[in-house]
Amino acid sequence: MEDLRLVNVTKKFDNFIAVDSIDLEIKQGEFFSFLGPSGCGKTTLLRMIAGFEIPTEGNIFIGDTDISKLPPYKRPVNTIFQNYSLFPHISIYDNIAFGLKVKKVHKSEIKDRVQQMLKLVKMEAHKSKFPNQLSGGQKQRIAIARALINEPKVLLLDEPLAALDLKLRQHMLIELMNIHDAVGITFLYVTHDQSEALNIADRLAIMNKGSFAQVGMPDDVYERPETIFAAYFIGDTNLIEGRVVEIHDEFATVVCHTDSEHEIEIDTTYHRQPVLDEVITLSLRPEKIAISRRPPKRKDDFNILQGVIEDILYGGTHTQYIVKVGAHFLRVFQQHKKVYIDELSLDWEEHVYLYWHDTDTHIIFETDKNKVNSENIMKTIRRK
């Protein structure tokens, strides 16, 4: 098993630390994604694996081989860039065959392997064309074929779909997953797009300021964020700071810091047990909250709050309600559906009930220094 391992990998540019003491193991054949905002260090990390940058400290291994100081052409990896990097003056066939020709592979073998790659990316009918005759999605397929024909152990993809429109990106994500399943090698995918990483990765690492905010499977990272940055960067969430006032065997009660009359019960089965009087942050996804003019019929295991609708934002598949509850503003997503035909839509300044199951409130054992979900949430939402 030739896993990819990063051991204490650090990259400094003068006094700036772009990547800070990263340790990570990626299993052979895994589809792994580095996810984070611009400037977080994800591309620098990819470039060190590719050999375009040398680590200031630490080592990079593929299997038992330390590749940290090897030049790019001696590493068993290939990179696909956002701009495709195809040769414009030669045919698609020759673009794909280029690496094998450099290695002086026999012509008959080149022909067979190019045909296999063209079939893999579904471009057999275009082998005689030139890059300027192809669409963006077709160029990306050729770039993938050219990279895979050299049989790398790791394929590095640096925001490969960023230049494509939304529909084509969604289609190419499926194609990438199919290609990965067909070839079975390790894919390492860099993106700032949350939905891409959640859809495509077996595991992902959220990066922030050169370090990992969280590493895990997409559903774990989304449902159980370990840091405030991870919770806020992946999807939308409500962050509520509070103090633990009661602890029982499988649940605890938290009082909101800015509004002591509101208590929230949380299931602690999937967390470490909090400590009495500990200050924590609760992460509550907007789609987990139900909103109604009436309280729920079932009240066991549910948190119920009352509030007033401050704003309504139409989102196509759903409506986002901004509800003021005491000193807090909470986001609520309500999917568009017609279950009760005669039910009237909610309106501004209506008094409503918000309720959710106590297992849907996740504890983050740190406090929110920026207060992104309290007095500033309305400004944040309007900027979006």
Image (cartoon, grey):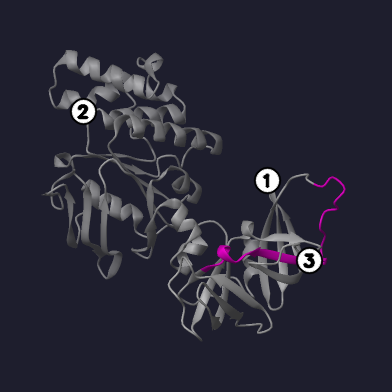
Mark 1 or 3: the one toward you: 3
Separation of marks 1 and 2 at Cα, in angstroms: 46 Å
Give the number of the disc on residue 317. Answer: 1
Q: In this view, does 62 lie above or below 287?
A: above
| The C terminus sits in image quarter | bottom right
Magenta segment boundaries in residue numbering: 340-362
- Specify which label sits upstream in the sequence, 3 or 2: 2
Separation of marks 3 and 2 at Cα, in angstroms: 64 Å
Position of 301 with respect to 96 (left or right) is right
**Three-letter amino acid code of the residue under disc 3:** Val
Q: Residue 133's x, y, as percent?
A: 43, 21
- Specify which label sits upstream in the sequence, 1 or 3: 1
Q: Which of 221 and 170 is in front in this view?
A: 221
Give the number of the disc on residue 352. Answer: 3
Mark 1 or 2: the one toward you: 1
**Three-letter amino acid code of the residue under disc 2:** Gly
Q: Which residue is drawn at 23% across and 25% down?
A: 98
Residue beneath disc 2: 99
Q: How many C-alpha atoms fall within 10 Å of the one at disc 3: few (<14), some, or many (≥20)?
A: many
Q: Is residue 357 magenta?
A: yes
Position of 341 with respect to 200 (left or right) is right
Give the number of the disc on residue 50. Answer: none
Q: Is residue 267 magenta?
A: no
**Three-letter amino acid code of the residue under disc 1:** Thr
Separation of marks 1 and 3 at Cα, in angstroms: 21 Å
